[in-house]
């Protein structure tokens, strides 16, 4: 393990998060979408971003597959690598809300401890956990990327839901039953929560 440097000092920015939020005319927050592969995390996150963009909000989606092409391209899918993957994403999301951006993350993030660690990086209320609830059977039937088929055939080790566990959120801010609701209904459920919490303004 690389030893952490003791020669770095935190530099306080001249422009604050509050300044950036005033510029953007909305609060910044982390919307953490979690769920099994095929549960609709990325689809919902991008649909919410599209809605927020048309709403006039500054947004960005950190998508699991996209991040693994760059920031986390050196990581595999062992439990240890999954932990490090989520640690990096948590730190990135923290920086992005400091930039005044509504940050949407779409990751399986299977372990409660890792999601809890990401939550603890930011002030209370800045981390909204959204559980995309969908039965494993439905996710397998969808199998958009063909991953479950490969996992069942033993071609993908450590696959969540097959030979690696998924720990459901115990107290998420929102549960979206993506197997029962339409995409539009799911988006509206997220937007309702954001309006209730005054993250965005009506109108």
Image (cartoon, rainbow, N blue to C red):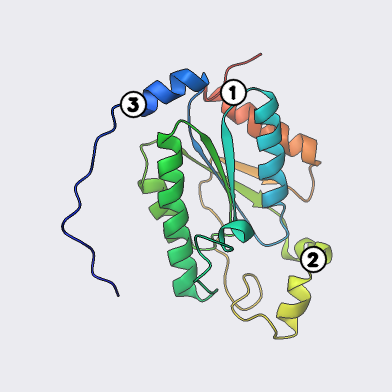
* Labels in figure, total: 3
Q: Nearer the viewer, mark 3 or mark 2?
A: 3
On the image, numbered disc 3 is attached to which residue? Answer: 15
In the structure shown, which secondary structural element does the residue marked by tag 1 occupy? helix
Please say if 79 is above or below 10: below
Residue 143: assigned label: 2
Which mark sits nearer the N-terminus, 3 or 2? 3
User: Where residue 111 sits in the image (x, y, percent)?
Assistant: 49, 63
Residue 2 is left or right of residue 95, and the answer is: left
Q: Residue furthest top?
A: 203
**CA gap, disc 1 to disc 2?**
33 Å
Q: Nearer the viewer, mark 1 or mark 3?
A: 3
Residue 121: assigned label: none
Q: Residue at x 46, y 30 (%)?
A: 100
Query: 85 or 125, which is in the foreground?
Result: 85
Residue 11 is left or right of residue 16, and the answer is: left
Task: Evaluate whether residue 126 shows in this view.
Answer: no
In the structure shown, which secondary structural element does the residue marked by tag 2 occupy? loop
Residue 195: assigned label: 1
For the residues labelled 3 and 2, say whether their Cβ atoms are less than 8 Å apart. no
Which mark sits nearer the N-terminus, 1 or 3? 3
User: Where residue 50 sits in the image (x, y, percent)?
Assistant: 70, 34
């Amino acid at each position: 393990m690389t030893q952490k440097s003791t020669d770095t000092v935190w530099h306080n920015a001249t422009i604050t998060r509050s300044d950036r939020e005033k510029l953007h005319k909305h609060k910044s927050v982390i919307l953490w979408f979690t769920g099994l592969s095929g549960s609709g995390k990325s689809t919902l996150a991008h649909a919410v971003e599209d809605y927020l963009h048309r709403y006039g909000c500054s947004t960005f989606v950190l998508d699991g597959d996209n991040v693994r092409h760059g920031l986390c391209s050196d990581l595999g899918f062992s439990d240890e690598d999954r932990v490090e993957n989520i640690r990096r994403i948590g730190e990135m999301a923290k920086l992005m809300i400091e930039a005044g951006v509504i940050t949407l993350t779409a990751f399986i993030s299977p372990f409660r401890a890792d999601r809890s660690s990401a939550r603890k990086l930011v002030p209370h209320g800045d981390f909204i956990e959204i559980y995309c609830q969908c039965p494993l059977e439905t996710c397998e039937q969808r199998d958009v990327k063909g991953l479950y088929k490969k996992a069942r055939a033993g071609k993908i080790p450590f696959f969540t839901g097959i030979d690696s566990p998924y720990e459901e959120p115990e107290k998420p801010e929102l549960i979206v039953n993506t197997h029962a609701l339409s995409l539009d209904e799911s988006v509206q459920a997220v937007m309702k929560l954001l309006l209730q919490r005054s993250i965005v303004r009506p109108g």
